[in-house]
Amino acid sequence: MTFEFIDLERSGPVGWLRFNRAPVNAVHWQMLDELEPAFVALHDDPSVRVIVIASALERHFNSGADISTFDGVDGARMAEWVTTSHRLASAVRRSEKPVLAAINGVAVGGGLEMTLHADLRFAAADARLGQPEVNIGFIPPVAGTQGLVRLIGRSQAFRMLYGGELIDASSAQQIGLVDFVTSPDRLLDDVQAYGEMLASKPANALASIRRCLIDGGSRDFEAGLAIERAEAIALADHDNFTEGVAAFLEKRKAEWV
C-alpha cells in the first residue's frame, strides 16, 4: 500500500511511519486521511514488531495542521477533522504492538499530539515542541487534551496549553513530555536499536503491558486491577510463559512464539 504524504518502510522488525509533506509536514485534509490507514497498514504487517512515528524531513517533524485548511471551516466541517483525528489517536492507543516516536526539529500542534499516544518518545537535542492552538482560538484536537493530561499531569498540561509556547527537548524531558533526548545524528539509530530490543521480547507480553498501562491506567484503580488480573491469567496459559519460566530455570535464551 502506498500513500502520497506518508512513507512506510521496514528496517528488520521495526516499521517506520514517516510524515513526508515538504516543507514542514503541515497536515492538510488528504494527509490527515492517510494517517490512520498508514498506521493500520504497518500494524497489520506480521513482519513488523514495533512501530515508529517519525519524519522524512531533516529539520521538521510535523508542524501540525496546515492552517490554510481551516479557512472558512465551521463546526460541521471541523467535526469531520476531529473524528478522523480521533480515529488515528485511538488506533495508536489500541495498538497490539509497541509504538515509539522519533522527534526531530519542530513538533507542534497535531504533530506533537500524535506522539502523545505512543509508548515512549525520543527527541533530538535540538527539537522544539509545543501546543500553540490557543493562539488561533483553538484546542489540540488529535486527542491532545486527553493525551497530554494523562502524560504530564493536569498542571503541566495547563501550562503548555494556556501558554502556547514552544519548549526545547531538555525542558520537555524534565516534565515527562519526552523520555529520551539524544544527539540529532544519533536519533534514528537510537530509536531503531530500542525497537530491535523490544522486538526481542515476547510480543504477547508487550501487548498485555500496553493494555494494562493504557486501558487500566485511564480507569479507576479497581478497574485497572481487573484488567491486570485478566491479562496475567491469559499470559499464564500462553506457551511463551511456559517457555520463559523453563528458559530461566535452565539458564538459556528463551525462544518465543
Image (spheres, rainbow, N blue to C red):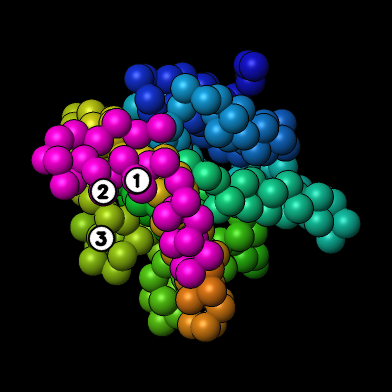
Q: Residue 123 at what x, y percent from top left?
A: 29, 46
Say which residue label 1 marks. 242
Q: Marks 2/3: CA distance?
A: 36 Å
Instruction: For the residues labelled 2 and 1, say whether their Cβ atoms are less than 8 Å apart.
Output: yes
Q: Residue at x 46, y 27 (%)?
A: 48
Query: Element type at marker 2?
Result: helix
Q: Residue 112 at what x, y percent from top left?
A: 47, 51
Q: Marks 2/1: CA distance?
A: 5 Å
Say which residue label 3 marks. 173
Main SS type for the magenta part?
helix
Q: Residue at x 63, y 16 (%)?
A: 2
Q: In which quadrant of the rendered image does the C terminus lie?
A: top left
Which three-letter amino acid code belongs to the residue tagged 2? Val
User: Is residue 27 shown left or right of residue 58?
Assistant: right
Residue 104 within the magenta-colored segment of the rendering: no
Say which residue label 2 marks. 245
